[in-house]
Image (cartoon, rainbow, N blue to C red):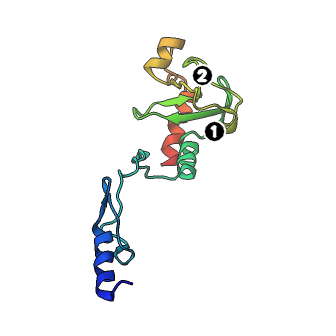
Amino acid sequence: MLRPLHRAYLLIAFAILPIGNASVVAPEEVGTSAVPFTSAPPPSRPRPPAQNKRPQDQAGAQRARWPAHNFPAPNGGLLVFTIMPSGNPACASYDGSGCLWGLNYDQIDFRRVRPLVCGQEHRARWGVTGYEDPQHWCSLARTLRGNRG
């Protein structure tokens, strides 16, 4: 039988006895490390560009930018139009030449729109700027813009 002192020496010996490349650790020494387990950080996900407006706000702004109006003859009927940064009115068009007469805002695919702009661009396609006749939609749209603020 081993004396208590000899048992303690044996326990210490087994606690530090190397086995291959590893050491046997006494049960009293098992615990959690003060150093947390770390690994590579998760890959960062690209952030979308910052948007100042929510999608609903953007849709509302788009709709407000393209009002519809019933214009009288000679070029008359329902027409969705906008005012370009140059101050010239432009109608919704898919080919940049013919206005989309008779279509309301919800019937137009704005991803395909290539506006027909009054002024020089209108003259290049139709021979007139659209401002010569005060009843032409270009003249009237420019007046409507002034009334909208």
> In this image, 75 relative to 45: left or right?
right
Q: Which residue is mark 1?
A: 68
x and y percent of residue 88 in the render? Answer: 45, 30
x and y percent of residue 28 in the render? Answer: 36, 78
Rendered view: 12 above or below 49: below
Is tag 1's residue or tag 2's residue first in the polypeptide sequence?
1
Amino acid type at image mark 1: Ala
State how far apart marks 1 and 2 are (Cα): 16 Å
Q: Residue at x 58, y 43 (%)?
A: 63
Between residues 120 and 61, which one lies in front from this camera angle? 61
Q: Residues within 10 Å of mark 1 (few under 14, many from 20)?
A: many
Q: Residues within 10 Å of mark 2 (few under 14, many from 20)?
A: some
Say whether residue 136 is visible.
no
x and y percent of residue 9 in the render? Answer: 28, 79
> In this image, 72 relative to 134: left or right?
right
Give residue 32's quadrant in the image.
Answer: bottom left
The disc placed on residue 94 is: 2
Rendered view: 4 above or below 132: below
Tag 2's secondary structure?
A: loop
Going by the picture, which residue comes out furthest to the front?
A: 1
Q: Residue at x 28, y 68 (%)?
A: 16
Give residue 76's quadrant in the image.
Answer: top right
> In this image, 97 relative to 105: left or right?
left
Between residues 95 and 80, which one lies in front from this camera angle? 95
Between residues 5 and 35, which one lies in front from this camera angle? 5
